[in-house]
Amino acid sequence: MINNKVTLIGEIETDPELQISPSNRPFATITIATMLPYKNSEGEYERDFNDVQLLAELAEEICNHASKGSVISVEGRLTNLIIELADNQNFKTSIVIAERVSLITNGNGRDVN
């Protein structure tokens, strides 16, 4: 069996916002920044920005306890979305569907464990 497993540790880029789906289920989409393991030509570490979909209780917990700047650990699976643009062209993107999330520090940089 081949597994689809993603683990990210990064910083939340904006305050999480709880939303309700048309089927009345809570969800949130957050972007977390993860640092790349090498420096650019200016000697600084570059970052990737990864979109993460939080569902149900995970969304509620992160929206209630995390904020911009919080460091979290996300375990989940990668899925692809195809978005139809106005000019009838398709845009493909990837998103992580969170299955487990741990809050490492809050937005103030303080450990929560």
Image: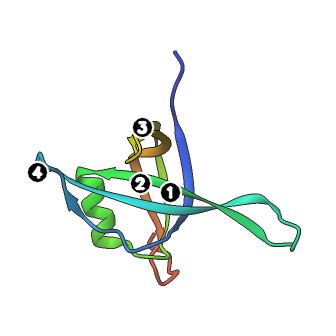
Among all residues in the image, which is located at the extreme left? 24
Q: Amino acid at mark 4?
A: Asn
Q: Earlier in the sequence, mark 4 or mark 1?
A: 4
Among all residues in the image, which is located at the extreme bottom? 108
**CB atoms at circles 4 and 3 under 8 Å apart?**
no
Q: Earlier in the sequence, mark 4 or mark 2?
A: 4
On-image quarter of the C terminus: bottom left
Q: Residues within 10 Å of mark 2 (few under 14, many from 20)?
A: some
Above or below: residue 44 compared with residue 61: below
Which numbered tag is attached to residue 73? 1
Residue 54 position, x and y percent, is: 34, 52
The residue under label 3 is 82
CA separation in Å, label 4 and label 1: 27 Å
Q: Amino acid at mark 2?
A: Val
Q: Earlier in the sequence, mark 2 or mark 3?
A: 3
Residue sitting nearer the eye, 76 or 52: 52
The residue under label 4 is 24
Q: Amino acid at mark 1?
A: Ser
